[in-house]
Image: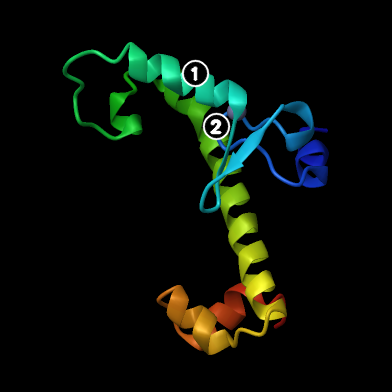
């Protein structure tokens, strides 16, 4: 059910995974999106940020396995969203006339790799 909701959405918040139809506003970044609710949460986190924060990757800050296991499907969904967004941007580049060579160069990969990854052809 959740996956059909996500696939019918134009975009979903990369942080809470709510579809654009369920949030007031969705701000787009490079392959990611953030909703107004998550912006507000970010504002609160920044406002209440302690003076010194350990410089660790988010997964290194987790200290119990349940927290890590809860994060895995969320990170996986965000990864799928970013990949779908990248594919959408590549298809748009193609529709606007970009060659596979130029797309490959932009992504720092070969023309062949870009074509294999994004063309949908085999
Ligand atoms: Zn959100």
User: For mark 2, what is the residue?
Assistant: 15
Marker disc for residue 93: none
Callout 2 environment at 10 Å: few (<14), some (14 to 19), or many (20+)?
Answer: some
Quadrant of ligand 1: it is top right
Say which quarter of the image contains residue 21: top right
Say which quarter of the image contains residue 15: top right
Instruction: Answer above or below: position of 47 versus 57.
Output: above
Residue 26 rendering spot, x and y as whole percentages: 64, 36
Residue 85 rendering spot, x and y as whole percentages: 62, 56
Q: Are marks 1 and 2 in contact (CB under 8 Å)?
A: yes
Tag 1 secondary structure: helix
User: For mark 1, what is the residue?
Assistant: 41
> Which residue is found at the position 34% from the left and 23% from the top?
62
> Which residue is found at the position 58% from the left and 86% from the top?
100
Q: CA distance from mark 1 to mark 2?
A: 10 Å
Callout 1 environment at 10 Å: few (<14), some (14 to 19), or many (20+)?
Answer: few
Residue 50 rendering spot, x and y as whole percentages: 23, 13
Residue 102 rendering spot, x and y as whole percentages: 51, 85
Mark 2 Cβ and ligand 1 under 8 Å apart: yes
Quick one: 35 or 109, which is closer to the camera? 35
User: Quadrant where the N terminus lies?
Assistant: top right
> Which residue is found at the position 59% from the left and 73% from the top?
117
Quick one: 35 or 67, which is closer to the camera? 35
Residue 26 horizontal side relative to residue 75, left or right: right
Residue 8 horizontal side relative to residue 109, left or right: right
> Which residue is found at the position 67% from the left and 32% from the top?
25
Quick one: 71 or 6, which is closer to the camera? 6
Residue 23 horizontal side relative to residue 105, left or right: right
Mark 1 Cβ and ligand 1 under 8 Å apart: yes
Tag 2 secondary structure: loop
Considering only order in the chain, which callout, 2 or 1, is on the residue closer to the N terminus? 2
């Amino acid at each position: 059910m959740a996956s059909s909701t996500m696939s019918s959405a134009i975009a979903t918040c990369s942080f809470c995974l709510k579809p654009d139809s369920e949030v007031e506003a969705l701000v787009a970044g490079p392959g990611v999106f953030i909703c107004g609710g998550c912006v507000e949460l970010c504002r609160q986190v920044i406002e209440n940020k302690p003076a010194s924060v350990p410089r660790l990757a988010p997964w290194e800050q987790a200290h119990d396995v349940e927290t890590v296991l809860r994060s895995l499907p969320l990170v996986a969904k965000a990864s799928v969203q970013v990949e779908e967004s990248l594919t959408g941007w590549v298809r748009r580049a193609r529709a606007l006339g970009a060659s596979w060579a130029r797309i490959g160069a932009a992504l720092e990969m070969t023309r062949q790799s870009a074509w294999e990854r994004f063309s949908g052809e085999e």
